[in-house]
Image (cartoon, helix red, strand yellow):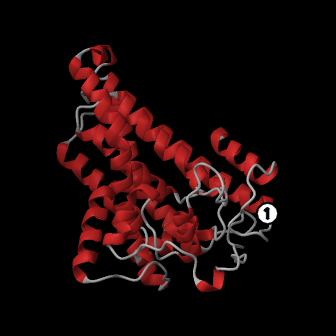
Amino acid sequence: LGYTLWWHATLHWFGFAERPFVAAREYRPGRVAHNLVWSVSGVVIWTGFENVFAYLWATGRLAYVDETAWSSRRGALHFCAALLLVPLWRDVHFFFAHRMLHFNALYAQVHSLHHRNTDVEPFSGLCMHPVEHLYYFACALPSLLLLTTPFALLWNGVHLLLSPGASHSGFEDHWQADAYHYFHHRYVSCNYAGTNAGFLDVWFGSFVDTLKPTDQKGCKPRPDAKATLTRPPSLEFAAYLALSAGCVLAWAVAASDVAAGAHAAAPRLAAHLAVLAGFGPVAAASAVTGITRSGGGAPRGGPLKTGLLLAFGTLFFS
């Protein structure tokens, strides 16, 4: 949060940049407060991820490459592999997980909260629904499945927590500006990848590299009244938040009991609870959207591309 505050203060308060994407933007403290609250949700959830990994390593449930081995050839190779491959994995994971969030039900119930910001500012980067935070941080998957160093998880976390602040700055003239992602917030149905993985958008036909003709002479402000804490949440929002929280908390309570030694983990029950936590929020989003008939999201492509997007998105979510 301190790093994101640095970006926000230097750009929006102290004028360290001179070319905002929207020249006539209105600075709304209420919108910043809204973004900050939902960003805190992300910090709390990532802290939970880190604590789970630390527990698994400390109790021997998950093997890892010890830091004392870094001076050996094997340890050095693990370190270099994490240093080089984590950013690449981040880009691929982000594209497929992000694109999945733009399918109708998940967009309506989850990702639309992030898109309340039609003109972004640094705190809007981590301003996400808690369910989106879970799937966003699922990028930690390699540290769970592969023999890696703790550095790999922390390096992954640095990317996950810090990069959204600069890429959502709202300005184009600083060293980490991301015009392509600004276009995504402006037009929604394009540029799902980060800047480094734009080739994925090219392959899937969702790449946009210029402003639309109506915006060529300067982007106009767009309504973002939903980005506020003063309006009570809708019944639809509250219902989905409760259902998705129930899916994850059922697993969390059982896992806490096992960790505390209250009882042993039953493999079948553990698998069922893991499926509930991984897929339950998606099923709940589909159910709530079907009942309320809410919509949104991006248009679908051909069956092959849609199938690939759904397959990889589901894998990276779960």
Of residues 131 and 162, which is closer to you in this image? 162
Q: Which residue is mark 1?
A: 28
Quadrant containing the N terminus is top right
Residue 197's place in the image compared with 184, above or below, is: above
Picture residue at 28% right of the left edge, 42% below the top: 142
Quadrant containing the C terminus is bottom left
Of residues 287 and 207, which is closer to you in this image? 207
Quarter location, residue 3: top right
Picture residue at 64% right of the left edge, 85% below the top: 214
Residue 87's place in the image compared with 303, above or below, is: above
Picture residue at 60% right of the left edge, 51% below the top: 166
**Is residue 257 toward the left or the right of residue 113 in the image?**
left
**Residue 178 in the image: x percent, y percent?**
55, 58
Question: Quick one: SS at disc 1?
Answer: loop
Residue 268's place in the image compared with 98, above or below, is: above
Picture residue at 64% right of the left edge, 80% below the top: 216
**Is residue 8 toward the left or the right of residue 197 in the image?**
right
Task: Please state which amino acid type lies under the numbered disc 1.
Answer: Arg
Quarter location, residue 218: bottom right
Residue 12's place in the image compared with 307, above or below, is: above
